[in-house]
Image: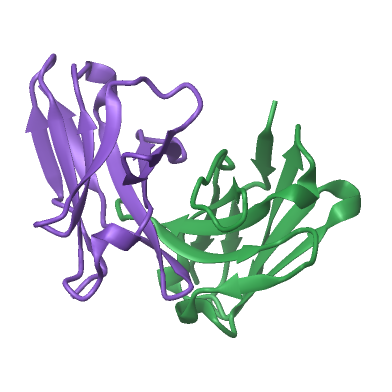
Amino acid sequence: QAVLTQPSSLSASPGASASLTCTLRSDINVGTYWIYWFQQKPGSPPQFLLTYKSESDKQRGSGVPSRFSGSKGASANAGILLISGLQSEDEADYYCMIWHSSTWVFGGGTKLTVL
Amino acid sequence: QVQLVQSGAEVKKPGASVKVSCKASGYTFTSYDINWVRQATGQGLEWMGWMNPNSGNTGYAQKFQGRVTMTRDTSITTAYMELSSLRSEDTAVYYCARNPGETGRFDPWGQGTLVTVSS
């Protein structure tokens, strides 16, 4: 089982909200991890969006709009990237990442379509 | 502004080695780690390893142990990633990314270097 699992795709309408999940393997407790999120548009390198561990430990990247936010779903053992007020420019691939066993591990990525 | 500029595309034969450079500017080179991440066409991101430009210390993903070497030249604020014994599966875009050590704030990223392994 992969360390981090992300749904391969998600569609949402402009103006709506999208919740992207990053599920940790069942033997890894999401509560102890910083979850990092990156956005990648076609033909461009990834860009750091935000990191979230708890409501008191979180940080958005420079210039990242406040409509991007992080949270956790403890019952689902998952990190969550919430994008509110979706815009066409949010259409991209989104990757989560954690530090696990002395290694940075990426999720497989979610392709977000805004239509 | 903070910037990482990578070397140009490479075409290599199976079994050869490739060395990709990552020129840093706009910040104190020795104050941030450099990580290397690769991405095969249409695939996800794969972390390869990190290097501390101040100490030269490195850490590699197990998958690449023995095949990858990360070095730097502080006099020209440049980091290098060398991958040996290339095979077709190594065809990918290779990125460098800065992070303030012990965090995953990879920011910024280099523009990427396409390495093609083909006979």
Q: Count every numbered label the image shows and give the total.
A: 0
Q: Where does the image place residue B7, in percent across and percent down from the top left?
A: 68, 47
Relative to A115, say whether A82 is above or below: below
Q: Where does the image place residue B74, in percent across and percent down from the top left?
A: 86, 54
Q: Residue furthest front?
A: A56
Residue B44 occupies which quadrant of the picture?
Answer: bottom left
Q: Where does the image place residue A80, in percent across and percent down from the top left?
A: 21, 44
- The residue lying at 13 percent from left, 16 percent from top is A14
Residue A28 occupies which quadrant of the picture?
Answer: bottom left
Q: Where does the image place residue A94, in percent across and percent down from the top left?
A: 29, 42
What colour do you see for chain B? green
Q: How is the image coloured?
A: by chain
Residue B30 appears left or right of B118 = right
Residue B43 appears left or right of A59 = left
- The residue lying at 73 percent from left, 56 percent from top is B79
Residue A36 appears left or right of B50 = left
Q: Quadrant of the N terminus of chain B?
A: top right
- The residue lying at 41 percent from left, 24 percent from top is A64
- The residue lying at 13 percent from left, 25 percent from top is A17
Residue B65 appears left or right of B70 = left
Q: Residue furthest bottom?
A: B66
Relative to B32, say whether A19 is above or below: above
- What is the letter of the purple chain? A
Relative to A19, say whether A84 is above or below: above
Quick one: A48 or A111, which is closer to the camera?
A: A48
